[in-house]
Image (cartoon, helix red, strand yellow):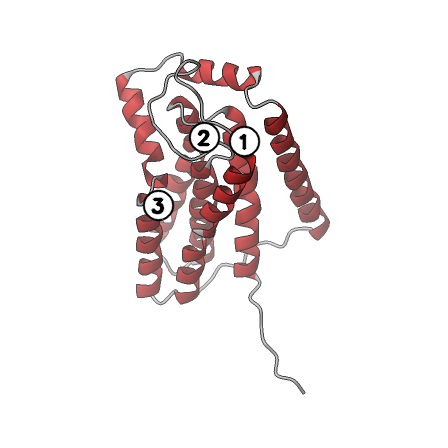
Amino acid sequence: MKIKLPDFNKGLIVYLLSSITIGFLLLTAFVLIDPLSNLDLKFSGEIQEHSNHPLDMAMKGVSWFGYMPNAVFLVIIAASLFFIFKYKREALFTILTLLSGLASSIIKFLVNRPRPLPSLVNILEKTRQQSFPSGHVVFYIVFFGFLILLMFRLSAINKIVRLSVSGCSLLLIFAVPVSRIYLGAHWFTDVLGGLLLGLLCLYLLSYFYLNPVTHRSAK
């Protein structure tokens, strides 16, 4: 049995999507014009101000799920579980969450923003790819956000399991932006860009999942 989600006003959805898209484009332009802003320096300084070893470990733990190949393994495990329990369509769309990584990688290449430097922030995680947007944030919003949608949608799954998965997913979504800045892997504008891009990707994935294309035979 699947829970029917509430219908939202189409005008409101279009407005929100347009706002998110415009916001992402404006933020990208801002990053291109000013790759090292005072805003980013301030956020990094505030978040890293009270760093300590236990917090270092906690922040690394939060980010663990987004590293390669961890993210791929996580998606495969989740998709396999859905497939085993006869949720084949859900398994397919779970695999499709990996496309968010491709989207963020393409934009990283195009924007080509350098990562934070050790001379400016405390670097607890060495990275190779470009900085904008945060691939971790994009992946967490798309993958864990889609899991939350499925937990609300699939009422046949045990309620405790659904609440546990939703709660953990929500916690990771909120924690990962702070984690990326704390570890010195990203600037504030990187994680904000990841948030906006992630929301766009999550909407597209959710839209096609909730609105399956039906093929009608020609009359």
Give the residue displayed 51% in from the left and 14% down from the top: 42
Q: Quadrant of residue 140?
A: top left
Quickly name the residue at label 3: 71
Query: Which numbered dot is residue 50?
Result: none
Q: Residues within 10 Å of mark 1 (few under 14, many from 20)?
A: many
Question: Helix or strand or loop: what does disc 3 sit on?
Answer: helix
Callout 1 touching callout 2 (CB < 8 Å):
yes
Q: Earlier in the sequence, mark 1 or mark 3?
A: 3
Residue 22 location in percent, x, y? 68, 38
Q: Quadrant of residue 121?
A: top left
Query: Which numbered dot is residue 177?
Result: 2
Count of labels in the image: 3
Residue 12 location in percent, x, y? 70, 46
Q: Look at label 2 and name its amino acid.
A: Pro
Quickly name the residue at label 1: 192
Question: Helix or strand or loop: what does disc 1 sit on?
Answer: helix
Q: Quadrant of residue 217?
A: bottom right
Give the residue displayed 44% in from the left and 54% down from the top: 150
Residue 67 location in percent, x, y? 34, 39
| Quadrant where the C terminus is found in the figure | bottom right
Q: Look at label 1 and name its amino acid.
A: Leu
